Amino acid sequence: MTGRQKARIISEDGAVFNGSFFGAEKDKVLELVFNTSMVGYQEILSDPSYTDQAVVMTYPLIGNYGMARDDYEARKPSIGAMIVHEYNDEPSNFRSERTLADVMKEYDITGVCDVDTRSLNRMIRDRGSRRALITGNEELSVEDAVEIVRSAEVPRDAVARVSCREIREFVPAKQKFSVVAIDCGMKENIARSLVERSCHVNIVPWNTSYENIKAMRPDGLFISNGPGDPRDVAPTINTVKKFLGEIPVFGICLGHQIISLAYGAEIYKLKFGHRGGNHPVKELATGKIEITSQNHSYAVDPESLKSTPLSAERINILDNTIEGVGCGRDRAFSVQYHPESAPGPRDSGFLFDRFLAMMEK
């Protein structure tokens, strides 16, 4: 793409990928991850779970249908960067209101296009997710860039940065249940999915105390997705621990890991994570297969479940990692993927109905 400032992506082990800036032209040190979704770049851009990450899109053409105001998953996108092979700055879609580059400039999100994303994604797949410097400084040596990456501090406050600062309320046309949702970087479509099922939803900050949530008298507690290492949100883990066995508890993605940690299980970081809209998940009790939308770096250690009341309910067919756990005694369960989709398949929406059935009882 002509007329754009040159950019380089220099990984912590010295690999260099050339491209051009679009969106904000800002140097950043970020973790490189890839997403295999063919559509949904707006939802990916605005998913808070991608905070501090540079997402490499495997689909080669991005930007072609523009941006629509109703498709954001966060009111303020916080993704670190988006890296694409070909960027289209002239979208063709009747719903399009702005270009992807304009939105990225507004929110100071770095974009790099004209990149050999096939080679870059293969590197991530083979070597694992890694940190890299995105830079427009053509004079910077690779050795100096590697030193910048290695000396950059790994942020530990991602959830605190993306969580709401005060309570957000969603009121259904006809209320059946009251749900408190702990916002660790919650996607908007989760709230929509609950409201559509007649739930009054109060979304509270990540560090809201047990006592303050208890005072709201919820019928159920929901723990959202979010960015970073789940072990960094100790206040949330402690709050969830106190609710186990009191009211139904449902968690998604980061919420899945938080519930597992609250029960005493352990987690570990995957080589390159799961990010895309085509991950097959098997329900162990029935053998049923769901095609799921996923975005996570961590997984629950299956051996650690043996010393907890939790049982594995679902596994990923591709690598046998745990995709869902539950404790019937406490009416608590969680999944590693996104039943609310946005983007992705809608096979798993019934999990919200399972949560409602628990509240009904």
Image (spheres, grey):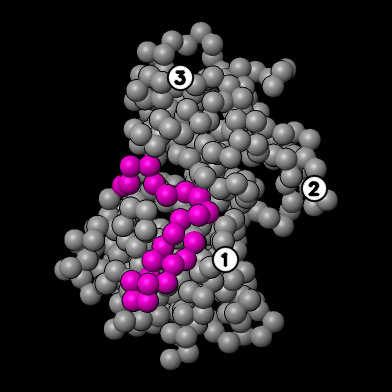
Q: In this picture, is 358 found above or below 51? A: below
Task: Give the magenta-colored segment's residue range.
Answer: 269-291
Quarter-wise, where is residue 4 in the image?
top right
**Which residue is at 34% across, 32% downward?**
127
Q: Residues within 10 Å of mark 1 (few under 14, many from 20)?
A: some
Could you tell me the amino acid type at mark 3? Val
Q: In this picture, is 102 found above or below 45? A: above
Q: Is residue 188 left or right of residue 324?
A: right
Point out residue 45 in the picture as x, y percentages from the top left corner. Answer: 59, 45
Front in this rendered view, residue 167 or 134: 134
Measure the C-alpha gap from mark 2 to mark 1. 23 Å
Q: In this picture, is 14 found above or below 71? A: above
Residue at the spot of label 3: 16
Quarter-wise, where is residue 169 in the image?
bottom right
Residue 93 has which mark? 2
Q: Secondary structure at mark 2?
A: loop
Could you tell me the amino acid type at mark 2? Asn
Q: How many marks?
A: 3
Front in this rendered view, residue 108 or 299: 299
Front in this rendered view, residue 65 or 216: 65
Residue at the spot of label 1: 346
**Which residue is at 38% across, 42% downward?**
272
**Quick one: label 3 or label 2, which is nearer the N terminus?**
3
